[in-house]
Amino acid sequence: RSSSTMSATIGTGSYDLYYTHGFTLIAITVFAFFYLSAMKMCFGTYFVRTAMSNYKSNKVIRSRYYELFSSRDNLMYHISWAKSRGELEEARNLMRQLEKVDKEIDQIETVNGQIFGSKARVAGEKLA
């Protein structure tokens, strides 16, 4: 082969550097395409640093959100028990706390949109 095709001899066979580099470029391009596509689809960004930052902030928000839902469930339990014991004043106080928790949950859902998906809540009962 002539030197214009950029060939080299390795061991006993010859190997064309032009085709080797072409394959390498194609492989890198295909890998980069799939990597960037996966990053954009999964994390909404092409950059790992941004994805990690978003993940950490979402983790804090999710933690607070689920903590509030746990508090809400606990309040619902205590409201039910207060009603069954006839302690309506205590039930009203707990209902006010429940309304505050619901407002905070609604605020987090409004501000953070699609982070949480759908989560069903049992509506608070009205006192007689």
Image (cartoon, rainbow, N blue to C red):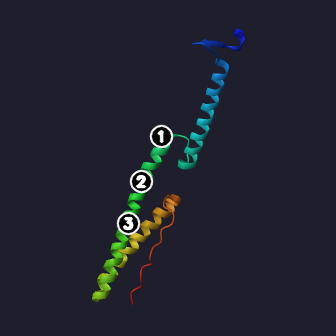
Residue hosting label 2: 59
| Relative to 93, residue 35 above or below | above
Furthest residue to the top?
3
The kind of residue tagged 2 is Lys
Q: Is residue 51 left or right of residue 12?
A: left
Which residue is painted at 38% across and 60% down in the image?
Answer: 64
Which quadrant of the figure contains the N terminus?
Answer: top right
Residue hosting label 3: 68
Determine whether the residue tagged by mark 3 lies in a helix, strand or loop.
helix
Which quadrant of the figure contains the C terminus?
Answer: bottom left
Disc 3 and disc 2: Cα gap in Å? 14 Å
x, y (%) of residue 6? Answer: 67, 13
| Relative to 36, residue 111 above or below | below
Foreground pick, 4 / 44: 4
Disc 1 and disc 2: Cα gap in Å? 15 Å
- Residue 28's label in the rendered image is none
x, y (%) of residue 123? Answer: 45, 78
Disc 3 and disc 1: Cα gap in Å? 29 Å
Residue count near mark 2 (Cα–Cα under 10 Å), binned few <14, some 14–19, many ≥20: few
Contact? badges 1 and 2 (CB < 8 Å): no
Residue count near mark 1 (Cα–Cα under 10 Å), binned few <14, some 14–19, many ≥20: few
* Earlier-in-chain disc, 1 versus 2: 1
Determine whether the residue tagged by mark 2 lies in a helix, strand or loop.
helix
x, y (%) of residue 44? Answer: 56, 48
Determine whether the residue tagged by mark 1 lies in a helix, strand or loop.
helix
Residue hosting label 1: 49
The kind of residue tagged 1 is Arg
Residue count near mark 3 (Cα–Cα under 10 Å), binned few <14, some 14–19, many ≥20: some
Closest to the camera, between mark 3 and mark 2, is 2
x, y (%) of residue 51? Answer: 49, 45
Which residue is painted at 48% across and 63% down in the image?
Answer: 109
* Earlier-in-chain disc, 3 versus 2: 2
